[in-house]
Image (tube, rainbow, N blue to C red):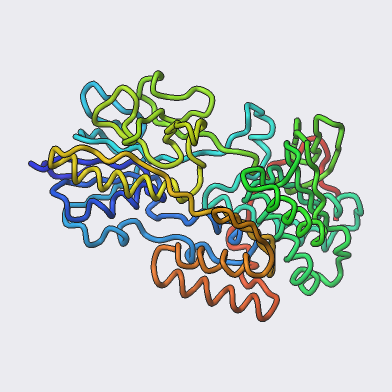
Amino acid sequence: MNIPNSDLPRVVIVGGGFAGISMAKKLKHLPVQLVMFDKHNYHTFQPLLYQVSTSGLEPDSIAYPLRKIMKNHKDFYFRLAEVEKIHSETNTITTSIGVLSYDYLIIATGTKTNYFGNEEIEHNAMPMKTIPQALNIRSLILQNFEKASITNDDEYRKALLNFVLVGAGPTGVELAGALAELKRNVLQRDYPDLNLADMQIHLLEGVDRVLPPMSKTASAKADKFLRDLGVHIHLNTIVTKYDGLNVETKDGLHLKAHTFIWSAGVTGNPVVGVTENALHEKVRRYIVDQYNRVQGYENIFAIGDIALMMSEEYPKGHPQVAQPAIQQGENLGENFKRLLKNQPLKPFVYKDKGSMATIGRNKAVADIKKLRFGGFFAWFIWMFVHLFSLVGFRNRVIVFFNWMYSYINFDKAARLIIRPFSVKKKEVEPEPEL
């Protein structure tokens, strides 16, 4: 894979997400050879994926080249590849492009969508963890509207305009709000021949409130905002089946929908090879100590969503969101300075900066320390925080311009089917003739 031998310690980072790049930045001036692997050549700002899927932003405005992030590192090597196995006994990894040795290994592979063992849902649902998946959702939504505008079959049209979202965490809530805004402000102009009353948005959640990770105040406000936008919320509802058309739940709810988006949970995305004793079987996250060192290893670390650091305050580990990942990456980067000088390591202490979620135009909820608020002020803070958290000045300018354009014109400009999405054929009910 054309990485030169070096007398410096080789630090290998697997994953270019929030955790991986925050640590890599901290290693900039250290005497190490830094190698990063990722299956994409860009960093994705995942909190805004839902805006790509609902035509609010183009994908290049929330992605940034990994090589450009690290362009000022003198001894940095990026390789577009997947790490397939870790051989801890020989300090080597097997990748899709070859084998490489390491002195220190940092696992920052994040999470993947959790379907809780339901293979039928996994086969038919639309996930939204990556930019390609968000683009698939965007294409599917617009394709379904195009089909709905030409069919004479009322039932088929209603199924095309039915949107079922499973999981009312931040992703599900923000996506539902964005779809409702599309219905209210944009799609009626694009499709004047359609009765937009046929467009139904259903948000299904397995517990008794939306936004379960946030405060009850935030949940109540978000619930009201969504219902005011016309979203149908189904709480304490567990989905048991989706065959590509029919949605069934444990309590007997039956819906027909050609768009079924799954955001009901995530699970760790571990790499084969690290002993199972270090991997929590239920959540598939590596058990780490207070320095992010993987249990049972001295030179293998895990940071971000894949790391499970249990404490009295966080008995189930830290939340799988951006801030813990960024802070763990920064802390481990600082600890490498200490490690190379044989100094004591600094334990990781998470500084909770709060949680936020937006629910459409001028509506958001925020939990910041002991403050609980919602509405326009929360929405403004949400925009400010996300704008300045983006990687790269260009991306901030583009996103800001898009947001201002959309706000002033009540529009979403990226309503483009760039690459049509091929929907799996549904055996249960063939498409009617047009």
Q: Position of residue 170 (x, y in %)?
A: 62, 50
Q: Residue at x 81, y 56 (%)?
A: 227
On the question of residue 433 being in view, the answer is no
Q: Quick one: quadrant of the N terminus?
A: top left
Q: Residue furthest left?
A: 7
Q: Position of residue 38 (x, y in %)?
A: 37, 45
On screen, residue 223 above or below 178: above
On the question of residue 58 being in view, the answer is yes
Q: Position of residue 277 (x, y in %)?
A: 40, 18
Q: Position of residue 253 (x, y in %)?
A: 86, 37
Q: Residue furthest bottom?
A: 408
Residue 95 in the figure: left or right of residue 40: left
Task: Please name whichever residue, 246 or 253, is drawn nearer the observer in this view of the structure.
Answer: 253
On screen, residue 258 above or below 345: below
Q: Residue at x 88, y 65 (%)?
A: 195
Residue 24 in the figure: left or right of residue 101: right
Residue 434 in the figure: left or right of residue 268: right
Q: Residue at x 11, y 41 (%)?
A: 5
Residue 402 in the figure: left or right of residue 20: right
Q: Quick one: quadrant of the C terminus?
A: bottom right
Task: Please name whichever residue, 72 or 285, is drawn nearer the observer in this view of the structure.
Answer: 285
Q: Residue at x 31, y 49 (%)?
A: 23
